Structures are given as C-alpha cells and as structure tokens.
Image (tube, grey):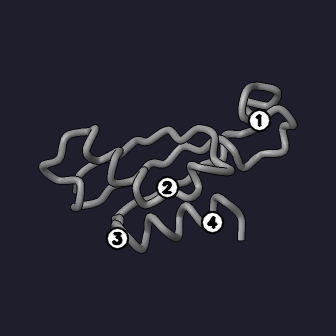
C-alpha cells in the first residue's frame, strides 16, 4: 500500500471525515532536504473536515492528526501540511 493510501486510511478510520483529500506533493520538493532522490512519498498535504475538530484550537487539531500518523512521520514522511476544518 502506498504511503498516501496509508495516511488516508488511518485518518478516515480515526476521524470519520465528511471530506478528505491527501495529496502527494513530493514532486514539488525534488532535490530538497527530505526528498533528495525525488522519488516521492515524502511530502504530503491533507485537507480534511471532521466534527471531531469542533471546538478545538488549530494546534490541538494538528496534534490529533500527528498522533495518528506518528509512525509515518518518523519515516518516510518528511513534511505534512494540514488544512483542517470542523464540521
């Protein structure tokens, strides 16, 4: 399973989002730190809407997502941009 698919599956299971989009933006960072080979699966953007974010500050929302993706953030994910919204 691809890293992108793993991220989407884990977030869907944990947050039951009404909308989710996981974008592999690794190609935008080819040759940069964390993606020196340009082979992808290192830089991602997640856009997600979930009622579980309601009433939580942005930093708390990000911590929730980072906790779910802790293994991926150790390796291979170098960067994760989050655009989170409450339902």
Q: CA distance from mark 3 to mark 2?
A: 18 Å
Mark closer to the chain start, 2 or 1: 1
Judging by the rendered image, the residue that carries numbered circle 2 is 70
Mark closer to the chain start, 1 or 4: 4
Q: CA distance from mark 2 to mark 1?
A: 19 Å
Judging by the rendered image, the residue that carries numbered circle 3 is 16
Mark closer to the chain start, 4 or 3: 4
Q: Position of residue 58 (x, y in %)?
A: 26, 39
The answer to whether 36 appears left or right of 8 in the picture is right
Within 10 Å of disc 1 (Cα), the crowding (few <14, some 14-19, many 20+) is many
In which quadrant of the rendered image does the C terminus lie?
A: bottom left
Mark closer to the chain start, 1 or 3: 3
Marks 2 and 3: in contact by CB < 8 Å?
no
Q: CA distance from mark 4 to mark 3?
A: 15 Å
Q: CA distance from mark 1 to mark 3?
A: 30 Å
Which residue does the image show at 56% across and 58% down from the upper left?
71
Which residue does the image show at 71% across and 71% down from the upper left?
1
Mark closer to the chain start, 3 or 2: 3
Judging by the rendered image, the residue that carries numbered circle 4 is 5
């Amino acid at each position: 399973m691809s890293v992108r698919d793993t991220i989407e599956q884990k977030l869907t299971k944990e947050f039951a989002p009404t909308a989710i989009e996981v974008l592999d933006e690794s190609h935008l960072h080819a040759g940069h730190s964390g993606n020196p080979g340009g082979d992808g699966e290192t830089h991602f953007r997640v856009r997600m809407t979930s009622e579980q974010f309601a009433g939580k500050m942005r930093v708390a929302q990000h911590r929730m997502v980072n906790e779910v993706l802790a293994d991926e953030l150790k390796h291979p994910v170098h960067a994760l941009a989050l655009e989170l919204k409450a339902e």
